[in-house]
Structure formats: structure tokens, C-alpha cells
Amino acid sequence: MAEKASELLDHPAESTTVVVIGAGPAGMTVATLLRHCGIDCVVLERRSRDHVAQRQRAGIVETRAVRMFDSWGLADRVLGGIPYDGILEFRVDGRNRLLSDSDGSDGPAARLCPQQVLVQKLTATYLEDGGDLRFEAADVSLHDLTGDRPTVGYRTADGTLRTITCDFVAGCDGDHGVSRTAIPDGALTAYAFDHGIGWLTVLADAPPPAHPLLAVSREGFAAHFPRGPHASRYYLQCPPDDDPAAWPEARVWNALRTRLGDPALVAGPITDREVFRLRSLVHEPMSHGRLFLVGDAAHIVSPMGGKGMNLALYDADVFVRAVRDFLRGDDSALDAYSARCLRRVWNDQEFSHWLTRTLHDAGDAEPFLRNLARARLDRLFTSPAAAGAFAELMTGLDPAGDAVAQKMPGNLLGTGGD
């Protein structure tokens, strides 16, 4: 179990500028960007490197995030996958409609890049640049967060107690990590929403679609996404407490063929399946003393719209630029960190909620809600203004929001590599 602060004093402490808790997309983006601009940090991850590298999660790095990495001069090193052409296919009762999420602006576009590929490349880049990454760090504990030099304690794989003092702690260890639980009760306000919807997510060695596909029918929602040249990720709406064992392969493929409106859908070996609830959660503020929450440690977003990982990348960028400014003598960006991030968090939460309700209500909701949802879809397919707003939200590009951010204390919109 974690050591008390008094016991940590008996052990000589290392020293660094930032301790990063967690080696997922948020943590490795923070660490890689810090290292890129010459700021010392140590990354602590409780899992093994193999475990972290194989986590199967989101698959699209949105346009804004690609351009963020490009501004740091890192896009070619850390982004795998293939360019995404920006075309989404909506299939309503078997009828296909293609919608572009391109806003017509110049610059790099989104990438089809599964989370594990991004994490692997970030990890390799960080280590190649001399980064300090410690896997299997157990019993991580955070102390003196409101002082000038917080202390982080942990045990190595062989049980040795280590302590590190730092200027800042980046809590990038997700919704169930130790970072947020180190914040005293009452210091944060949690806003939670359960959508009452479950998804069966299926990974299979089967041909990917030409475009990411979202399907609506009276049988329920379904989706089909590429996960490589020969692999696909599928989603099937189901009760939130459903059992994956209740979905044998024959039932999975029958449901997909029906809901996707594709009787000839090619099946393949299913390599992973699980059921999860669609939920949303925001903690405010996203900082406490010298601890800054990044990504899922601060907020969870319904997966519709692919905003979860991309929000984590946004938080990481804002945090690193703020630390860089602090070390140059300007702490206004750190003071503005929570407000700056939460503006985008709530914007993306609203978009994800809108898309979640629209695509699920349009399928099997009661008639009034179903007709409302289908009217929204019809407007999306027929109104250039509605399609333009959708594209802006999908890409993550937000000119109006950037203009607001420029007026906030600690403008963080300069180029990354200076």
C-alpha cells in the first residue's frame, strides 16, 4: 500500500520538473512535448510496457490534433496510420448518405491512427530523445500538492521505495487512477451523465469499410470502422448491462448484417469483444495546487464523435505550453489551464451528446423522439450550414473559440517548437 508522507522523508528523493502519472495517450503526449522543448520529466506507469502498447481504443486523430503535432515538428514521428479522407458514411434504413467533415481549410488532415499505434510511436520518440519512463510503478502516492515542491512516491517492480520531488504533477492516469483521488474531497465538482445505452464493441480480422460507417435502423444503432488494412472495429447498440457471452459469433454477424443493411458483409475471426456503458463525466476544476489533470482523469466523453482521446491531446498541449511559459517567468497560462481546457471539454461534450442522441433516437426510440432525430439528420444532409457546423466540430477546428482563447490570460496559441 502507498506510503505515508512521513515515511517518504526517510528515503532520498530524486528531483525533476514534472512527474507524469500514466503512459497512455495523454501522459506520453505530455512527456514527449516536454522533452521536445527541453523540460525534464519522469513518467510513472503502473502497467507493463507490453500492456500499455496493446490497449485497443480510439482510432482517429482529428485534424486539430494532427496540426498540433505538426506545429511541434513531431507529426511525422508520432503519427502512424493513414490519412483520413474526411468522408463519413451514414446509413439510414439501408440508404447511404456521404458527409464530409472537411472544412476546406489548408493543412494536414485527420489520421486513422489507433490509440495503441499513437502510444507506441510517442513512447519510442520519448525514449529516443532520452526520456525517463518507468513501467510497473506500484503504489504511486502524491503529497504536498499545494506546496512549491510536491512529492511523488512509488515502488519499483522489485519493491524498492522511490520518491521524486517536482514542480508539477501531470495526472494522466485515467478515470480510475490515483491522481484525481489525491485531491481532497470537496475540492472538485463532478458532473456525470449516464446515457442509458450500451455498446457491444467487437474487433475482428475482417475487411474494413471504405469510409467510417454509422448506421441507423429500427433494430438499433451499429457502426463499422477501419482498424488497419485487414481489421475492423464494430459497435452494436445493446442494453448497458448486457453480457458479451450472450453474443456468440453467429449472433454478432447476423445483427451487423441486419443493422448495417449489408447482407453480404464479410465475416472474420473475432479477436476481442466487450460491453460498455455510454457515459459522460466532467470534473471541475482540472487542477489542484501543483497537480494538473489531463485527459480521462478529468473528463469522460461518450465515444460518439471520437472526442475522448483528442480531448486528452488538447489538454496535454495546453499544459505543456503553460509549463514552458511558467519556466520563462509567466504563470498566467497555468492559472488559465482549467478554464481554457474546460471550454473545449464542454463544447465537445455537447457535440458528442447531440450525435449520440440523434443516431440512437433515430433508430428505435418512441415515435416522437425518432421523428425529431430523423429531422435533425435530414437537416444535416440537406443544409450546407448544418453540414459546415458538423465538419467544424468533427475536425476539432474552432476559429471562433481560438479567437476567444487569444483574449484569455496566457495565450497558448503560438507555435510549439520555439
Image (cartoon, rainbow, N blue to C red):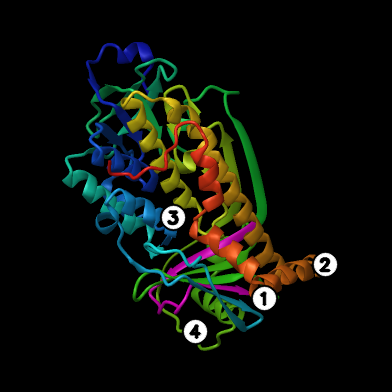
Q: CA distance from mark 2 to mark 3?
A: 36 Å
Left or right of 266? Residue 195 is right
How packed mark 2 is, by other alpha carbons closer than 10 Å (few <14, some 14-19, many 20 or more), is few
Q: Nearer the viewer, mark 4 or mark 1?
A: 1
Residue behind mark 3: 64
Mark 4 or mark 1, earlier in chain: 4
Magenta stretch, main secondary structure class: strand
Say which of marks 3 and 4 sits in front: 3
Q: Position of residue 325 (x, y in %)?
A: 35, 30
Percent from the top left, x then y, of residue 140?
36, 29
Marks 2 and 4, how far apart at CA: 32 Å
Report the amino acid beneath label 2: Phe
Mark 3 packing: few (<14 Cα in 10 Å), some, or many (20+)? many
Q: Nearer the viewer, mark 1 or mark 2?
A: 1
Residue 95 position (above or below residue 280): below
Magenta residues, as a range? 197-216
Q: Nearer the viewer, mark 2 or mark 4?
A: 2
Is 243 located above or below residue 98 in the figure? above
**Which class describes the residues within 10 Å of circle 4: few (<14), some (14-19), or many (20+)?**
some
Q: Nearer the viewer, residue 301 or 252?
A: 301
Report helix, strand or loop for mark 2. Answer: helix
Between marks 3 and 4, how big is the CA–CA gap? 33 Å
- Whole-percent x, y for residue 95 in the image: 63, 84
| Residue shown at the point (22%, 49%) measured from the top left | 125
Q: Tag on residue 382?
A: 1
Identify the element where label 1 is drawn.
Answer: helix
Q: Which of the labelled discs sits on residue 265, or is there none?
A: 4
**Kind of residue sitting beneath label 4:** Leu
Which three-letter amino acid code belongs to the residue tagged 3? Arg
Q: Which residue is mark 2?
A: 368
